[in-house]
Amino acid sequence: MKILLVEDDRKISAFVQKGLKELGFNITACEDGDEGYYVATTQSFDAVILDIMLPGRDGLSILRNLREQKNTVPVILLTARSALNERLEGLNLGADDYLCKPFFIEELAARLHAVSRRASGNTLNLLQCGELVVDLISREIKIGKQGIELTAREFSLLELLLRSPDRVYTRTQILEHVWGYDFDPQTNVVDVYIRRLRNKTKEFPGAPVIETVRGVGYRLKEPGQ
């Protein structure tokens, strides 16, 4: 998932970035409200983590303006434990969830998956194509009854392809969603990880196929198509 984090406390920001990246999320971070609002309105994200107390625009004004512009990106507010009025105002303005400081990264990750599923209309934790089933909460991957092990980056790549089977993703789109904008677009890292995924799944007859669309990119197809 591609996430925007708007948090001015550098310790909290570093903690969140490190923890979510280890879980396979792609994070873009901003330290003030003006920058955060600009990035939120000029780039596409699967969810936004938004601190309420920010220099420049505060979190609630960012949320208000996003919703006024009909921007429905899921938003999770970070609030002080005592800030009940701010939490209520945020929910009334269209926030999807909130989390009180301090918090555990695992809880934040679970809430990110939950708001993303609600936004897509999917209330399940599972993504499936053919015999391949991925549990987004437990991060368990099975093809039929056989479990397979993936690295965090391999998991993120597989999740991206699974969310839109048959959709062709260019190498640049995959880089942006899985590795981030700061990655060299000339790198062959996408091809390397596609090859790794194929090697880990190809021996299973019910596994979906990662198809190369020559000159464009890659897509996931049901087995036998």
Image (cartoon, rainbow, N blue to C red):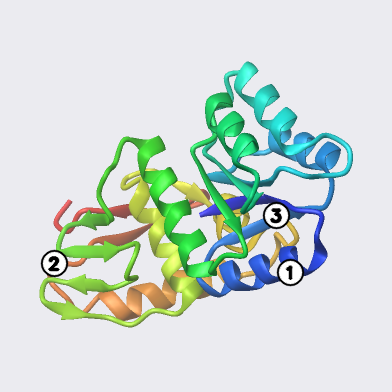
Residue drawn at 68 percent across, 71 percent down? 15
In the rendered structure, the answer to whether residue 115 lies left or right of residue 20 reads left
The crowd level at tag 1 (other Cα within 10 Å; few <14, some 14-19, many 20+) is: few
Residue 126, by quadrant, is bottom left
**Circles 3, 2 touching at the beta carbon (< 8 Å):** no
Residue drawn at 65 percent across, 66 percent down? 16
**C-alpha separation, residue under disc 3 versus residue under disc 1:** 11 Å
Q: Amino acid at mark 1?
A: Ala
The residue at which mark 2 appears reads as 206
Q: Amino acid at mark 3?
A: Thr
Callout 3 secondary element: strand
Residue 48, by quadrant, is top right
User: Is residue 112 depicted above or below 149 in this figure?
Assistant: above
In the rendered structure, the answer to whether residue 85 lies left or right of residue 155 reads right
Q: Choose the circle earlier in sequence order: 3 or 1.
A: 1
Q: Choose the circle earlier in sequence order: 3 or 2.
A: 3
Q: Position of residue 40 (x, y in %)?
A: 70, 37
Q: Position of residue 28 (x, y in %)?
A: 70, 54
The residue at which mark 3 appears reads as 28
Q: Could you tell me if residue 213 is visible in this image?
A: no
Callout 1 secondary element: helix
Q: Could you tell me if residue 147 is visible in this image?
A: yes
Q: Position of residue 9 (x, y in %)?
A: 80, 60
Of residues 198 and 78, the one nearer the viewer is 78
Callout 2 secondary element: loop
- Look at discs 1 and 2 and give the one toward the viewer: 1
**C-alpha separation, residue under disc 1 versus residue under disc 2:** 41 Å
The residue at which mark 1 appears reads as 14
Residue drawn at 65 percent across, 73 percent down? 18
